[in-house]
Image (tube, rainbow, N blue to C red):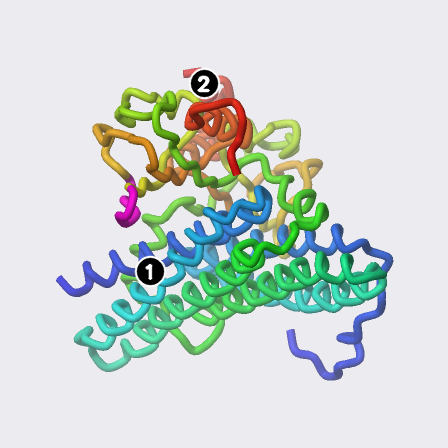
Amino acid sequence: MRRDSFEDLKVYMRPMSVREVLTEMKDICGLMIDLAYASVLLGDEDLANEVLELEREIDSLLYQLWMSAAIAVRDRTDAEAMAGIVKVAVAMDEISNAVSDITQIVVGKLGIHPAVKEVLEKIEPHYRRVIIKPNSYLVGKSIGELDLDINLGIYVIAIRRKKELIIDPEDYVKFEPNDIVVVKGPLDCLNDFSMIASGQIKDFKEVIED
Amino acid sequence: MSLEKIENLLLRLLDTSRTMIDLAYSALLYNDKVFAEEVLKLEEEVDELHTELELEALKLKRQEGEERGVLGLIRLGLSAEAISDAAASIADVVARGFEPHPILRVAFNEAEEGIALIRVDDGSELDGKSLDELELDEMGIKILAVKKLGGRWIRNPPGNLIVSGQDLLMVSGYRDSIEELREMASSSETEEE
């Protein structure tokens, strides 16, 4: 996405506490790492672009944090405590910058070296793109109701549905036929999920109880 | 041959930098200087790995048109190094002894799963047992690495490795299981500071 003006970049003070800002920064950072690695491994430009979008969000959250922190500090003790928090937030911003640089391998003028692919395939957690077949057990069920993280040990990072890309889907999101799902987790768990998504395993219980 | 070396270096680099973020968060959460210092040491290790990786990448024989791929590889290493620097600067907050703000605890306590460092006390339940004997996988705990006193981190340690007092364990698992293991690694009820 190209910006023609800097108007929309201005950050206005939002009523967020320091804690809320920090928690959100941490969550977004974690998500960015997953998306960046997955984008390189799968050669997926859309995932890479989401990382860049999130990076801008982190930038504006850092401004938020400065503002909330400035208002919260009343005396010397507060200032000392807040110094650590601000340092942590700045470090998170640095992480997000480094992570978005990774995506240049996919969207920039860099290439994916075979060794990079080899390594990303080996490293934990693993990432995989899976298509939900119309006859799969998953169709019509929500992520929350399936309890995928607890039952299968996997996390859904993104769902591509026709032209839409849902990043970090909420629990209420239901799988639809032909969804392309990007998931992360240990290899065995991803294999189980693939089998269920393809309809090769009909009943969820087959994999949960071993 | 040298490609294999590159893969090995890159794997360790990416793995370590990512682990460092979790460790740095844990150091904040527990306000633990031992954790924090480990993160700072890992940062030095990452610097070495990164230099080695770049040297190996320069040695790669490449054909016309392969430059972009090699540059991508170098940049990935650079990003991992930058991530580890950032993790170290989080750990620095703890190492300097800033009183941890309660906000930090709340913000970093939400994840159910995490990575932690556990110091094994002499005479604790873990002291003298092999990793296999401890059956940690039954607790849902995975040992990522072990560090003997004065030694370096041993990644993916073999099951017959004997755990002894003063060892540092890097583990991943659910918070509850980690707390349970922390108690097993402690020789007494009271925490010494």
Q: Which residue is mark 2?
A: A206
User: Distance between the Cα atoms at labels 1 and 2?
Assistant: 44 Å
- Callout in the foreground (1, 2): 1
Position of A21 with respect to B51 (left or right) is: right
Tell me which corner region of the image, top left, top right, bottom left or bottom right, holds residue B142: top left
Q: Residue at x 71, y 56 (%)?
A: A81
The subunit letter for the residue under badge 2 reads A
Structural crowding at the residue carrying mark 1, measured as other residues with C-alpha within 10 Å and reported as few (<14), some (14–19) or many (≥20): some
Q: Quadrant of the N terminus of chain B?
A: bottom left
Tell me which corner region of the image, top left, top right, bottom left or bottom right, holds residue A18: bottom right
Residue A181 in view, yes or no: no
Callout 2: SS: helix
The residue closer to the viewer here, B113 or A171, is: B113
As drawn, the label of residue A135 is: none
Q: Residue at x 59, y 44 (%)?
A: B29
Residue B134, horizontal then vertical, whole percent: 33, 22
Q: Residue at x 37, y 21 (%)?
A: B125
Residue B33, horizontal then vertical, whole percent: 50, 49
Residue B135 in view, yes or no: yes
Q: Amino acid at mark 2?
A: Glu
As drawn, the label of residue B45 is: 1
- The segment highlighted magenta reads B149-156
Helix, strand or loop for the magenta stretch, by majority: loop
